[in-house]
Amino acid sequence: MELTDALADYAAATAVFVEVARRIDPADLDRHAPGAWSARQVIHHVADAEVEAASRLHRLLGEAPGAALLAFDEAGWATTPALDYAARPVGPSLAIIEGLRASSLDILGRLTPADLERQGVHSERGPYSVADWIRSHSDHPRAHATQMLEAASA
Ligand code: NI
């Protein structure tokens, strides 16, 4: 995919997620099918994923080649009482999602072809380039938007 198309897709996935999240009635934020996440939990998960993703992107671009890029324990973060995904207000997390994805999009739009080839080493995936980052982060909110809609009507 051309970079311009990839970035348009990235922006569209952000817009879909934020629009769906805003459309959910606050009274439905905690509905969920048995064993599945609520929309509230999904929003906090996506916010934390964006914080981690932004950190990886900045390390890819700002550190020397081969920088260590960390995965995180998604299920653990979603269930530890310390992060309280089940009860925290969603407004700050939505602001994180919008702000960080807008910032990352702006950064990505300024990169040279050589920047796209910059590589770090991901703790789960091994060698990992900026182009890999774009591929793996573009669509993440889109899948979770569907999951939120299902949860809110469960
Ligand atoms: Ni996810």
Image: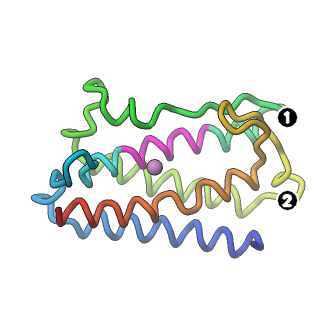
The region drawn magenta spans 45-55
Residue 124 badge:
none
Q: Quadrant of the N terminus?
A: bottom right
Amino acid type assigned to the residue bearing label 1 in the image: Pro
Q: Label 1, secondary structure: give it.
A: loop
Residues at discs 1 and 2 in contact (Cβ within 8 Å) = no
Identify the residue at horizontal 62%, vertical 31% (top origin): 70
Find disc 2 in the rendering and name its residue.
112
Q: Quadrant of the C terminus?
A: bottom left
Residue 112, how many percent across, how many down?
A: 85, 59
Residue 147 sits in quarter: bottom left
Q: Depth check: 69 or 61 in front?
A: 69
Q: Which mark is residue 65?
A: 1
Outermost residue on the front side: it is 34
Q: Would you identify the image quadrant in which residue 64 lies?
A: top right
Q: Position of residue 38 (x, y in %)?
A: 24, 51
Q: Residue furthest right?
A: 114
- Residue at the image point whose x is 44% and y is 41% from the top: 48
